[in-house]
Amino acid sequence: MDAREGSADILLQLRQKLSPAGDVVSPRGRALTEKVFGKPLTPVEVVQTICNDVQTEGTAALLRYCQALDNAELSAAELRVPAEALEQAHAAADPKLIESIRRIRDNITEFQSAILHQDVTIEPREGVRLTQRYVPLHRIGVCVPGGAAAYPSTVLMTVVPAQVAGVKQIAVVAPPTKFGAYNTDMLATCHELGVSEVYRMGGAQAVAAMAYGCDCIEPVHKIVGPGNLFVALAKKHVFGTVDIDSFAGPSEVIVIADGTARADYIAADLLAQAEHSPGSAILITWDEALIDAVHDELAKQVVQLERNELTVESLEAFGALILVRDEQQACELTDEFAPEHLHIETANPRDQIAKIRNSGAAFLGHHTPVALGDYAAGPSHVLPTGGTCTWAAGLSSNSFLRSGSITEFDEPALKQIAPDVERLAEKEGLTAHARSVSIRR
């Protein structure tokens, strides 16, 4: 579309469709809902029903939904993946994959260690010592998708930052499918990282089980990791009982490009997001010739993809090629959309990123595809979507720390500050507060 003479309304439409409120559900998901619940419940109603059932009935409800939603006949004893199955998966995995996992783990560890918060102590006056300390969460849960593809990368991008933070107990859940908890590569990655607590459960029922606990799994303090709409809504539902990383929707990318960018690179970058299906892929450029060239490349490259039918559906529903007046308008539209991923393929990408506040993760230059961040660079690929990066941050080692203050005064320091405390407490009518100080003077 041509947005040179006005605003790009299509971006607002896409933002609405991509938000969790847009109820982006596959036809299979809608059909399954009617089959399981006997009526066309909304996704919110489905999640509320599942979470309430698991909270009240525990393992029985969990097993029931595993059978109904994932067609998995499991006993309570079979929900947890045995240690020997993790060992066997690791032994059966491609040795080169294990080598890659180790290198990627080191990349993530190096970055996440460098940004990890450290305790800060100041002594502003004699007799006063103030500390802000950071304590790792004790137990967390990780959601790993496993519906249409296997995601060992998600294990790396969630578990390693938690380990860097010092989390002692990590429970991984994945649906009981060939791409989930029965996937050799995913299980091998867990074993390589030292994760021994892996469960064959997915969807809203797994989120509820981790939040509330049941016979087969102890409750966690925080739930992280991506998933479909039902997982996102379940995380929102249990927030407050536990912490969550974000309320995430379909994956998104905006590519900002100028005449120095290669059309084949851009097309490949757009297709990489669209193949998530649903996934939003948007090009914004002020080079008119680039629009046509990228369109042609998309048609040429998509037929070569394994998931080409799903990718085309995603492009048609959530894709856009947008022509703008100039660099300034490109930055303004991007900031308004606030994409999960931002890839700037221009002559001077640092100039554009300086003008853009809102993106979950930014990738600069012609040789920095988003896939580097998805798999290996070091920052986590678990990022805010749906425009929430205007206030939310991506997952990091700091996401697994709980911050608290420590205050220490000696007697002379107390006497010095006491009049201010007493005066303010009395103004608020909290005389017991005032007396707790005055009694020490």
Image (tube, rainbow, N blue to C red):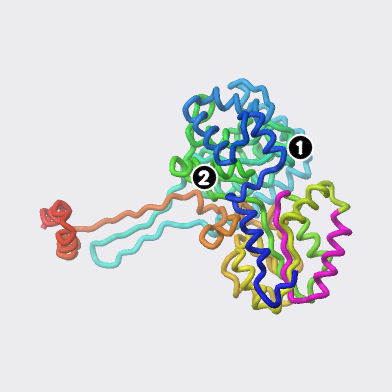
The residue carrying mark 2 is: 236
Which image quadrant: the C terminus?
Answer: bottom left
Where is residue 405, by image quadrant? Answer: bottom left
74 magenta-colored: no
Where 244 falls versus 201 (above or below)? Answer: below
Segment tinted magenta in the rendering: 277-302
Q: Tell me what residue is drawn at x 77 percent, y 41 percent.
A: 95
The answer to whether residue 15 is visible is yes
Residue type for callout 1: Ala
Where is residue 33, by image quadrant? Answer: top right
Q: CA distance from mark 1 to mark 2?
A: 35 Å
Residue in front for this viewpoint, 197 or 227: 227
Earlier-in-chain disc, 1 versus 2: 1
Local crowd size for mark 2, using a 10 Å CA cut-off: few (<14), some (14–19), many (≥20)? some
Local crowd size for mark 1, using a 10 Å CA cut-off: few (<14), some (14–19), many (≥20)? some
Q: Which mark is residue 338?
A: none
Residue in front for this viewpoint, 44 or 238: 44
Residue in front for this viewpoint, 40 or 82: 40
Q: Please state if 241 lies on the left or on the right of 306 as rendered.
A: left
Which image quadrant: the N terminus?
Answer: bottom right
Judge depth for marks 1 and 2 and give the one in front: 2
The kind of secondary structure element at disc 2 is: helix
Residue 75 coordinates in the image, percent (x, y) = 61, 20
The answer to whether residue 415 is visible is no
Q: Please state if 208 lies on the left or on the right of 29 as rendered.
A: left
Where 204 falls versus 391 (above or below)? Answer: above
Residue 48 coordinates in the image, percent (x, y) = 52, 36
Residue type for callout 2: Lys
Q: Which mark is residue 93?
A: 1
The kind of secondary structure element at disc 1 is: loop
289 magenta-colored: yes
